Image: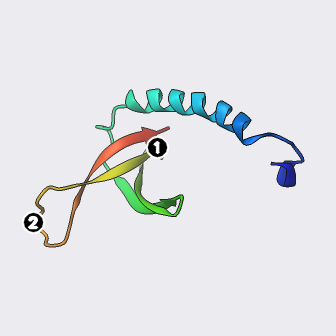
Amino acid sequence: MRDLLGVRISEGTVLNIRQPAARQVGAISRGLDLLPVRVGLHDEIFQASQPVLAGVDASSTCCYLLQQSNIATPIPGAFTCSMLSMRV
């Protein structure tokens, strides 16, 4: 923050700001209905050097996270995904 914006702020202060915001976003995400998603554009993103399956609803541009499911598919090597949460 100091190098980019010239603002001195401790890591603890950033954490104290981030935690309540993350709780609020989680509550909003859990209340969203994912059934209207008809066309999902899926890809892999990286968070802390770890791959994360994600997608976006083509009509509303809402983003959501995916979780690989262990369900048999008719195509060998394919896998199905279930939605974890959605971000507006």
Residue at image mark 1: 62
Residue furthest toward the bottom?
76
At x 52%, y 64%, the residue is 49
Which quarter of the picture shows residue 80? bottom left
Vertical position of residue 72 compared to residue 10: above or below: below
Q: Quadrant of residue 3?
A: bottom right
Q: Residue at x 33, y 37 (%)?
A: 34
Report the amino acid beneath label 2.
Answer: Pro
Q: Nearer the viewer, residue 27 or 60?
A: 27
Q: 54 or 24: which is nearer to us?
A: 24
Residue 5, image x, y percentages: 86, 48
Q: CA distance from mark 2 to mark 1?
A: 29 Å
**Residue at label 2?**
74
Q: Is residue 17 above or below residue 73?
A: above
Check the image and tell me how it is coloured: rainbow
Q: Amino acid at mark 1?
A: Cys
